[in-house]
Image (spheres, helix red, strand yellow):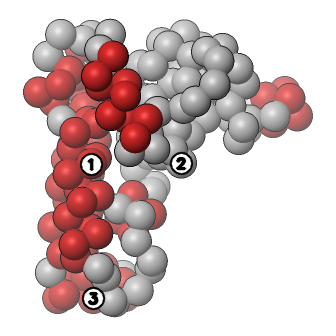
């Protein structure tokens, strides 16, 4: 599982939830759970809410969740949807996300989490490369 140092770093970066394990995520209220609007964790079956707004990990069991392929690069990299992008902030976000989802950190986890980690890492790399260069960023904006 997660070491104390890793949990502390994730908390500092705002990517680890505070509070008690087993609490219902803020984004999933009783009404949304009844209507199954809230996605469920593949591992424990509990409602998975966003952690730090990202939703990478289940708040109950901390299992890495499948990536959201519908999420755009700007929201993934926490940037305004604009041609002007703060490249320093973009680089910091890229490093932050890679510290969370890079496959090297999942070598001792289940095969499912290893696969999810590879997919997340690929999405993060694609988003970073696309938004870093002005030409690809512009093409992405108009597409």
Which tag is nearer the camera, tag 1 or tag 2?
Answer: 1
Residue 43 position in % (x across, y down): 48, 12
Q: Which residue is mark 1?
A: 96
Q: Residue 25, can we see it?
A: yes
Q: Is residue 81 left or right of residue 135?
A: right
Residue 108 position in % (x across, y down): 18, 10
Specify the quadrant of the image occupied by residue 79.
bottom left
How far apart marks 3 and 2 lie (CA) works out to 26 Å
Q: Return the mark for residue 49.
A: none
Which one is earlier in the sequence, the residue at label 1 or at label 2?
Answer: 2
Badge 1, how many Cα within 10 Å: few under 14, some, many 20+? some
Which tag is nearer the camera, tag 3 or tag 2?
Answer: 2
Judging from the image, what secondary structure is the residue with disc 3 in?
Answer: helix
Q: Residue at x 68, y 31 (%)?
A: 25
Q: Which residue is mark 2?
A: 53
Q: Is residue 129 above or below residue 101?
A: below
Q: Which residue is mark 3?
A: 138
Q: Residue at x 40, y 50 (%)?
A: 69
Compare residues 91 and 108 and report the one nearer the observer. Answer: 91
Q: Is residue 5 left or right of residue 134?
A: right
Q: Residue at x 29, y 25 (%)?
A: 6
């Amino acid at each position: 599982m997660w070491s104390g140092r890793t949990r502390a770093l994730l908390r500092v970066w705002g990517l680890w939830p505070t509070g008690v394990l087993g609490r219902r995520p803020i984004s999933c209220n009783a009404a949304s759970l009844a209507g199954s609007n809230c996605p469920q964790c593949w591992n424990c079956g509990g409602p998975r809410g966003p952690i730090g707004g990202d939703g990478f990990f289940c708040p109950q069991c901390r299992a890495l969740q499948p990536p959201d392929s519908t999420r755009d690069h700007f929201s993934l990299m926490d940037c305004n949807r604009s041609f002007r992008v703060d490249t320093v902030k973009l680089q910091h976000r890229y490093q932050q996300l890679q510290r969370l989802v890079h496959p090297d950190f999942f070598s001792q986890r289940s095969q499912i989490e290893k696969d999810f980690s590879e997919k997340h890492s690929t999405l993060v790399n694609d988003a970073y490369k696309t938004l870093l260069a002005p030409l690809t960023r512009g093409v992405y904006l108009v597409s």
